[in-house]
Amino acid sequence: MHALRHRDPLRIVEPSSGIHEEVVMLTSGRRLLPVLRKHRALYLLMLPGILYYIIFKYVPMYGIIIAFQDYSVGKGILGSKFVGFKHFVEFFYVTPDAWKLIRNTVLLNVYDLLFHFPAPILLAILFHEIRITWFKRLVQSISYMPHFLSTVVIAGILVTFLSPSTGVVNHALERLFGLEPIMFLGEPGWFRTIYVGSEIWQKIGWGTILYLAAISGIDPTLYEAAKMDGASRFQQVRHITLVGMVPVMIVLFVLTLGHFMEIGFQKILLLYNSMNYETSDVINTFVYRRGILDADFSFATAVGLFQSVIGLILVVTANRIVRKHSGTSLW
């Protein structure tokens, strides 16, 4: 283990010099055409994705203007009256539930980061430690399955399983512990636990893919050297496996912060009700009600822009911090 301490933990997998040179050429803008010509097949495969982002992500940014207008469908974007930051002020100082919405959004995201983010990391390490190949593949395949279920199906499963009258969970609690039926989706205190727990169950398996790829890139000789030094299995995981996963963990953490104010809208919309509003009503559901149901497009756009700005600030700040302390960053 002594020999391992002198290695840069973020340089376990050294990039190919040829790839590195081409990345430098692309980012610096020099000799772009030769690189595009050389890898034209790959860039053609990327084209649908690029077009998707241009058409559905970048072009709609033009509509951000209505956040600063009293938008009228009849007058259009160019003809609507400019009102500056009126809608932002209205959200923070006039909307009675504004701070409750922000609190619920932040708390759900904090719980999601604390429990959901590390879950795929731990599962990937467990998969890596399984030595029986067929069993490893079987468990991995089973863990991936919930990812392919739609949010509507997941919400339906939760409603059915947690029903106070016919739900499996309440029946089990009654038979095993003699407890009275619990209205899980009718009590505000249970909502965050249900949401985060269902997110982990649905996404933990799929989330291991990138971490397993990072583990597969670790030099096997490091494990052999550790064994020769007398390192236990736990020490190998701690000093080699975890360290080799750090760059991927950092990148995914920074990307996750970009969606910090945009907690999963669909699942919350399907699970929230008047009884659990106190903890389930978040900014996204509020934007849906004001923008779609009440047709207040300018106000809804202003609140959505606030979410995006917070996400951008968090990503830029986190990227700077991790680049300074670890040398790994998005840019």
Image: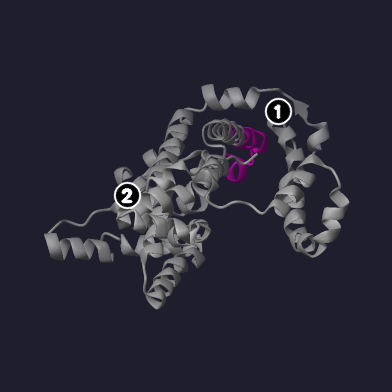
Residue at figure coordinates x 41%, y 60% from the top left? 224
Q: Please state which amino acid type lies under the numbered disc 2.
A: Gly
Residue 194 showing in the rendered view: no
SS for callout 2: helix
Q: Main secondary structure of the magenta part?
A: helix
Lower position in the chain sequence, tag 2 or tag 1: 1
x and y percentages locating residue 39 in the rendered image: 80, 60
Q: Is 42 included in the stretch rendered in magenta?
A: no
Which residues make up the magenta segment? 290-306
- Tell me if I can see residue 147 in this picture: yes
Question: Is 101 above or below relative to 150?
Answer: above
| The C terminus sits in image quarter | top right
Question: Where is residue 202 shown, x and y percent of the image?
Answer: 43, 60
> Which residue lies at the image location 30% right of the left edge and 43% below the top edge?
189
Front residue of this view, candidates 75 and 286: 286
| Color style of the picture | one colour
Q: Mark 1 = which residue?
A: 68
Among all residues in the image, which is located at the extreme left? 178
The picture places residue 59, in percent across and down from the top left corner, at: 77, 45
- Please name whichever residue, 193 or 144, is drawn nearer the observer in this view of the structure: 144
Q: Dot 1 surroundings within 10 Å: few (below 14), some, or many (20 or more)?
A: many
Q: CA distance from mark 2 to mark 1?
A: 38 Å
Query: In the current view of this chain or complex, which residue is farthest to the bottom?
Result: 134
Which residue is the site of mark 2?
186
